Image: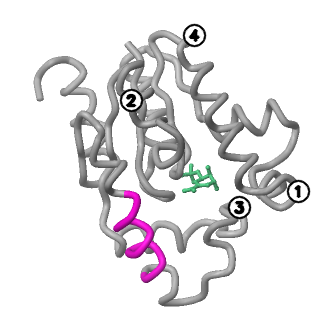
C-alpha cells in the first residue's frame, strides 16, 4: 500500500501522515525532507539558489523514487500534484488523498508557522495571505480534485477518516 497525501501548504499533510502511519504501523516519508536530504539544502535555499523550476524537477525525481517505497504514507509538497503529470503518476502508484481545507482555515494555520520556511508565501502580509491562498487554490484544485478521495475536518478527524478508509470502512 502506498498512500499520497496531497493538499495546499498548511493543510496538515505531515502531521496527519505521521499520525496515520504510526497507527497503521506503516512507514512515513515527507517529500520536502527527502529533497532537502538529497541536495543538502533547505527548500528556501533551493528556491533562492537554484530556482523553482529546479525544485519542481527534484520533486518529480523524488516522486519517481516513490515507486520503490512500499507500505508507506507520503506527505507530498503542496505544489507537487500541479506539475508534469505528477497527479497521474501518483494515482497509478497508489491511493491519493486530498486534504481539503478552506483558504480561511489554511491561512489561520499557516499564520502560526514561520512563513519564511515556505518561499511562495514568505512575502505576504496580513490579509494578503488568505487572498493569495484563495486564488492559488482556484488554480490548484483542478489538480488536487483528481485525487481518489477528498477529506476535510480537524487533523484528528481527517486522520480517523483516512484510517477508516484504508481499513475499508469509509
Ligand atoms: C510548496 C509547498 C511546500 C514546499 C515548497 C513549495 C508549494 O511544501 O514543497 O515550499 O508550491 O505549495 P508543503 O506543502 O509541505 O508546505
Please state which of residues 29 and 84 is positioned toward the viewer in this rendering: 84
Q: Residues within 10 Å of mark 2 (few under 14, many from 20)?
A: many
Q: Secondary structure at mark 3?
A: helix
In this figure, which residue is indicated by the disc labeled 3?
A: 117
Asked if the stretch drawn in magenta spans residue 132, the answer is yes
Q: In the rendering, which numbered label is found on residue 68?
A: 4
152 w.r.t. 124: above or below? above
Number of the front mark, 3 or 2: 3
Q: CA distance from mark 3 to mark 2?
A: 24 Å
Q: Earlier in the sequence, mark 3 or mark 2?
A: 2
In this figure, which residue is indicated by the disc labeled 2?
A: 20
Q: In the rendering, which numbered label is found on residue 49?
A: 1
Q: CA distance from mark 1 to mark 4?
A: 29 Å
Number of the front mark, 2 or 4: 4
Q: Residues within 10 Å of mark 4 (few under 14, many from 20)?
A: few
Please state which of residues 20 and 34 is positioned toward the viewer in this rendering: 34
Q: Which segment is the magenta one? A: 131-140
Residue at (24% x, 33% y) in the render: 148
Q: Secondary structure at mark 2?
A: helix
Q: Earlier in the sequence, mark 4 or mark 3?
A: 4
Residue at (50% x, 37% y) in the render: 75
Q: Earlier in the sequence, mark 1 or mark 4?
A: 1
Q: Residues within 10 Å of mark 1 (few under 14, many from 20)?
A: few
Number of the front mark, 2 or 1: 1
Check contact, mark 2 vs mark 4: CB within 8 A: no
Q: Earlier in the sequence, mark 1 or mark 3?
A: 1
Q: Secondary structure at mark 4?
A: helix
In what quadrant of the picture does the N terminus appear?
top left
Residue at (29% x, 42% y) in the render: 146
Amino acid at each position: 500500500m502506498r498512500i499520497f497525501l496531497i493538499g495546499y501548504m498548511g493543510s496538515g499533510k505531515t502531521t496527519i501522515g505521521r499520525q496515520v502511519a504510526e497507527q497503521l504501523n506503516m512507514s512515513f516519508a515527507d517529500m520536502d525532507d527527502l529533497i532537502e536530504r538529497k541536495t543538502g539544502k533547505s527548500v528556501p535555499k533551493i528556491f533562492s539558489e537554484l530556482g523553482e523550476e529546479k525544485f519542481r524537477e527534484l520533486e518529480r525525481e523524488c516522486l519517481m523514487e516513490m515507486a520503490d517505497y512500499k507500505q508507506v504514507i507520503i506527505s507530498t509538497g503542496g505544489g507537487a500534484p500541479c506539475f508534469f503529470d505528477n497527479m497521474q503518476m501518483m494515482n497509478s502508484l497508489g491511493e491519493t488523498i486530498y486534504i481539503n481545507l478552506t483558504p480561511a482555515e489554511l491561512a489561520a494555520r499557516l499564520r502560526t508557522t514561520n512563513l519564511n520556511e515556505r518561499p511562495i508565501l514568505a512575502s505576504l502580509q496580513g490579509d494578503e495571505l488568505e487572498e493569495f491562498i484563495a486564488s492559488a487554490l482556484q488554480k490548484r484544485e483542478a489538480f488536487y480534485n483528481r485525487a481518489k478521495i477528498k477529506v476535510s475536518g480537524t487533523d484528528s478527524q481527517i486522520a480517523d477518516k483516512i484510517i477508516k478508509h484504508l481499513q475499508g470502512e469509509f
